[in-house]
Amino acid sequence: MNRRYFFPTAFSFFAIPALAAESELDADIAIIGGGVGGCAAALAALRRGLRVILSEETAWVGGQLTSQAVPPDEHPWIEMFGCTRGYRNYRNAVRDYYRMHYKLTAEARARVELNPGNGTVSRLTHEPRVSLAVLEEMLAPYVKSGSLRVLLEHAPTSAVTNGDHVVSVTLHDSHENVRRTVTAKYFLDATETGELLPLTNTQFVTGAEARGRTQELHAQSQASPSKNQAFTFCFAIDHLEGEDHTIEKPRDYNQWRSYIPALDPPWTGPLFSWDTCDPKTLGKRVAYFAPNPTGAEPAGLNLWTYRRILARNNFDPGEYASDISLVNWPQNDYWLGDLLTATPEQKQ
């Protein structure tokens, strides 16, 4: 059977004790949200000599690549073209991190386009902790020089504006349970769900707009603000032959076991079926789950290798008892609630 593999909170050198006494901070640019876009924006500003404050609601910078536990999902030509220099440097640094710190086989170490997980969704499926280490190393020189302040576990709660100009943003430090106000010449919203937009009274729309507003031929006649992408709680698993980690049936097990999404066009069957809805044809896509496969695989999508983030055959014998794969599939998307239009209480 399969068991969950969890990523505990990592120690970060961004935790600066001197910050505890400070309630007001200022910078040239304040970037609210430390995901991939926030880190890229910070590096671009820092390289131009600007002072930057980068805040992040979670304990890790990196967003999709780290706390969201999702390896990069790129186009098939990423190794040849269609990549910025900064992103190329990041990708190379991830591979170098494995070569420097992991016991790779000689064959894997020599592979220029090393894919640690040999996953099919990306040419660089790897562990979230590695991306965290790489991103922290990229930001470290600016933290040391004092031109960058990173505020982890800080979420925006309010903002002060003067016309169309954002004067300051107040952040709640969930670790110290205090509030800090940041002033800056410019504020960038790099949050995952646009938290600064309502706080600053910035005009925005969510979901599907009405045909009368956009004149799109296939748009709906009425706007649907809650029609947004589903969200997913990802988790990693390994597979050890002979072990049984079956638990008692959770609450609502029977309901979810037979749940069929009410969508138009219709879903292809029960959400928790191995078969999924093909995103291109909307027909049934044959999928299966084959941990630690050997030899040629049958036709269809092997959900084990799809988002596998560690392939044990890339490492010296005995280093890992199993591959490690990430569960981030259509089957664990949740669309019965919308994070963008929900109240804070509804989100919880």
Image (tube, helix red, strand yellow):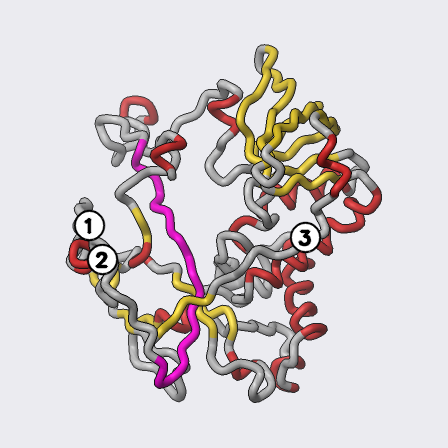
Residues drawn in magenta:
226-243
Res. 327 image quadrant? bottom left
Identified at 73% across, 39% down, the residue is 149
Q: Nearer the viewer, mark 3 or mark 2?
A: 3
Is 231 covered by the magenta stretch? yes
Question: Is residue 265 or residue 198 the one in the foreground?
Answer: 198
In the rendered image of this protein, does residue 161 appear above or below residue 109? above
Identify which residue is drawn at 65% across, 25% down: 181
Residue 271 badge: 2
Where 153 sits versus 98, above or below? above
Is residue 234 highlighted in magenta?
yes
Q: Residue furthest right?
A: 145
Q: For the residues marked 2 and 1, what is the alpha-carbon distance in whole angstroms?
A: 7 Å
Q: Which residue is mark 3?
A: 12
Residue pointed to by mark 1: 261
Q: Position of residue 238 (x, y in %)?
A: 43, 74
User: Which amino acid, by three-letter code, is at mark 2?
Assistant: Leu
Q: Nearer the viewer, residue 141 or 229?
A: 141
Q: CA distance from mark 1 to mark 3?
A: 41 Å
Q: Which mark is residue 282?
A: none
Circle 1 packing at 10 Å, graded few (<14), some (14-19), many (20+), is some
Q: Are marks 2 and 1 in contact (CB under 8 Å)?
A: yes
